[in-house]
Image (spheres, rainbow, N blue to C red):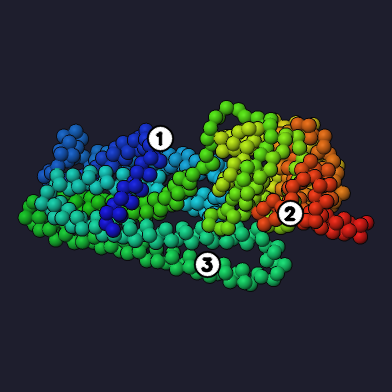
């Protein structure tokens, strides 16, 4: 256990040093400034000792600094007080510089880590986000990131400051009375063992606190996103009760952490009190024996309280370090998740040939196979429809084509190249994908449609909107294409959101347009209008559609029927109508329902 703990400690220290390395020059300036500031800290006790001895008519104050001041400035009280003021002003100026070296620098370190974290999230596979709550990721980006900021700034500053302070003040005390100073230092060795034990207890408790905080954040985010559902089913009290239970757990973990932290401060105060008793006892005896002057004794006692600062600061350092390394470890786990891997030739790739699925199978982790032996092909420029009952595997098949998932068996070929060998960036650049629930950003309609374009112009955006049968409705808005959308397009209807998502995919002129049941919220006539508009781009664009409305895809070049992850029908509308299968039965049923509606 001890060996494992030592390994974890070294690993955490290594992570901290790697974060600081790019800014080592700034940190070095801060360290050098701290050395200068703390070197000046020995002046006030020495000046007080000189003043007190001077008032008593004594010139016996020992120490190299006392000799230096006495030889350069004499024992004029006015001169000593002026020197004290100069020292205090210099300390004030240098403390500002050390803040530049530590506190300002931590913002750059945090910015780098935040940028790496966000960049990492944008490159992780879709499967990662399926199993990781959004609230947890937000907690890492805020609460954990803030703990790392505190570690890389105040924590490093206080650690350096307290260590340098301890060495400098100890040297001053040693110059006055070595025996008394050694008597004080003998009390220090047990401290590191107590500190190490308490710091480990803080680490494991803070880990639980952050995990529970992430869980609460995830629960809150999910609740706010689904608040309408909660209200519709009158589950407000139930949801509040669940939140209260999770909050209670968080409180328990926080109290447990606070109890451990609370032990540290009284312990440090107790140590400082023991120091004071030793000085009063041994120091008073030394004055009586003439080994210390009255001024040295007062200066010694004053320096002792200065020596208490490193002891007190150690508590803050341990607290911030354990919290910071715990949070950094949680962030590092995300940074180490394997990204979408691009293999093969990294040269530019264009989709120019056939698309072929060769005996493709797929399953989610240990679940049963979602897709089984999928085998079919179609040429570029085709319109292909995927149909079948709910849960047949249509969306999964489309996501394999975009490399959101990797087949567990079989191969997919695009233009003669296996999909594994096609760089993901090039592949998705060639495909315009519209999922079942298209996401809209909190910006203008123009910017949402032109998202994939570097410098979109109004003509491109309007063309895409016309193709998606949404242009006329956008024009009716008071600000037209400059209309600001609410979060997730909350100020639009479901059909409008779907059509804007289709327009966004069309705006980049993809080689293949993939529509994953993204017309469910529009009426059948609007759906037929959109599909009719898409015929204009069939010469250069392959159209792959997943839909439940069979009447809208009668003209497709190829219709693939999926049931329970298997292909049970393959052909044109006419060919499938000749078979007594799911397609024919469902088509006739939908046709009958449509006639009743008309």
The residue beneath circle 1 is 22
If you read the primary sequence from the N terminus, does the residue marked by circle 2 or circle 3 appear first? Answer: 3
Residue 272 at least partly seen: no
Q: Earlier in the sequence, mark 2 or mark 1?
A: 1
- The residue at the point 57 percent across, 69 percent down is 242
Question: What's the residue at 38%, 37% (across, down)?
Answer: 21
| Above-or-below relation of 372 to 444 | below
Q: Is residue 232 above or below residue 330?
A: below
Q: Which residue is mark 3?
A: 246
Kindly identify which residue carries mark 2: 388
Q: How many marks?
A: 3
10 Å neighbourhood of mark 1: few (<14), some, or many (≥20)?
few
Check disc 2: other Cα within 10 Å, few if <14, some if 14-19, many if 20+.
many
Measuring from the top left, give residue 442's x and y in whole percent: 69, 46
Residue at 30%, 54% (x, y): give it.
Answer: 4
Are the residues flagged by discs 3 and 1 in contact, CB closer than 8 Å? no
Q: CA distance from mark 2 to mark 1?
A: 55 Å
In depth, the one of 341 and 222 nearer the eye is 341
- Near mark 3 (Cα within 10 A), the count class, few <14, some 14-19 or many ≥20, is some
Q: Position of residue 292 (x, y in %)?
A: 11, 51
- The numbered dot on residue 571 is none
Residue 239 occupies quadrant: bottom right
Q: CA distance from mark 2 to mark 3?
A: 41 Å
Label 3 and label 1: CA atoms lie apart by 40 Å
Quarter of the image where the C terminus is located:
bottom right
Label 2's element? loop
- Which of the two residues, 429 or 345, is positioned nearer the viewer here? 345
Task: Give yes or no for contact between labels 2 and 3 (Cβ–Cβ under 8 Å).
Answer: no
């Amino acid at each position: 256990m001890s060996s494992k703990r030592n390994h974890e400690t070294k690993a955490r220290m290594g992570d901290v040093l790697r974060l600081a390395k790019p800014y080592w020059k700034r940190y070095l300036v801060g360290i050098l400034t701290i050395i200068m500031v703390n070197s000046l800290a020995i002046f006030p006790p020495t000046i007080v000792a000189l003043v007190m001895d001077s008032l008593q008519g004594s010139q016996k104050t020992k120490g190299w600094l006392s000799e230096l001041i006495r030889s350069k400035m004499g024992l004029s009280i006015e001169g000593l007080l002026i020197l004290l003021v100069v020292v205090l002003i210099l300390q004030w100026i240098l403390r500002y510089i050390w803040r530049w070296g530590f506190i300002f620098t931590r913002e750059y370190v945090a910015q780098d880590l935040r940028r790496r974290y966000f960049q990492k999230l944008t490159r992780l596979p879709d499967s990662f986000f399926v199993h990781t709550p959004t609230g947890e990721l937000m907690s890492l980006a805020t609460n954990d990131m803030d703990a790392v900021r505190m570690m890389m700034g105040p924590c490093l500053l206080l650690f350096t400051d307290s260590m340098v302070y301890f060495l400098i003040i100890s040297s001053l005390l040693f110059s006055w009375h070595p025996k008394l100073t050694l008597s004080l230092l003998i009390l220090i060795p047990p401290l590191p063992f107590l500190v190490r034990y308490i710091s480990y207890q803080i680490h494991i408790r803070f880990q639980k606190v952050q995990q529970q905080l992430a869980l609460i954040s995830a629960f809150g985010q999910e609740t706010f996103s689904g608040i309408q559902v909660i209200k519709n089913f009158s589950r407000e009290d139930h949801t509040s009760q669940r939140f209260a239970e999770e909050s209670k757990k968080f409180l328990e973990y926080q109290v447990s952490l606070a109890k451990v932290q609370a032990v540290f401060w009284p312990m440090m105060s107790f140590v400082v009190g023991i120091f004071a008793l030793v000085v009063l006892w041994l120091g008073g005896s030394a004055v009586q024996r003439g080994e210390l002057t009255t001024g040295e004794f007062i200066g010694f006692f004053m320096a002792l309280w200065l020596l208490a600062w490193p002891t007190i600061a150690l508590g803050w350092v341990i607290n911030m370090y354990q919290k910071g390394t715990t949070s950094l470890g949680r962030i590092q786990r995300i940074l180490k998740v394997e990204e979408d891997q691009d293999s093969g030739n990294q040269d530019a790739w264009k989709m120019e040939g056939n698309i072929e699925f060769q005996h493709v199978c797929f399953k989610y982790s240990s679940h049963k196979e979602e897709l089984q032996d999928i085998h079919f092909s179609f040429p570029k420029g085709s319109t292909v429809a995927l149909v079948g009952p709910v849960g047949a595997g249509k969306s999964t098949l489309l996501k394999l084509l975009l490399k959101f998932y990797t087949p567990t068996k079989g191969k997919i070929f695009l233009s003669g190249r296996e999909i594994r060998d096609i760089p993901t960036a090039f592949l998705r650049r060639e495909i315009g994908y519209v999922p079942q629930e298209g996401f809209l950003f909190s910006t203008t309609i123009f910017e949402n449609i032109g998202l994939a374009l570097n410098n979109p112009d109004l003509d491109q955006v309007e063309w895409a909107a016309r193709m998606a049968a949404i242009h006329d409705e956008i024009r009716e808005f008071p600000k037209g294409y400059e209309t600001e959308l609410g979060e997730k397009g909350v100020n639009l209807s479901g059909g409008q959101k779907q059509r804007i998502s289709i327009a966004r995919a069309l705006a980049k002129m993809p080689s293949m347009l993939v529509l994953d049941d993204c017309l469910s919220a529009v009426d059948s006539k609007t759906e037929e209008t959109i599909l009719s508009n898409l015929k204009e781009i069939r010469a250069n664009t392959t159209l792959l559609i997943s839909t439940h409305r069979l009447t809208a895809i009668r003209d497709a070049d190829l219709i693939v029927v999926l049931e329970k992850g298997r292909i049970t029908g393959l052909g044109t509308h006419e060919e499938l109508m000749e078979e007594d299968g799911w397609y024919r039965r469902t088509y006739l049923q939908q046709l009958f329902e449509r006639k009743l509606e008309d």
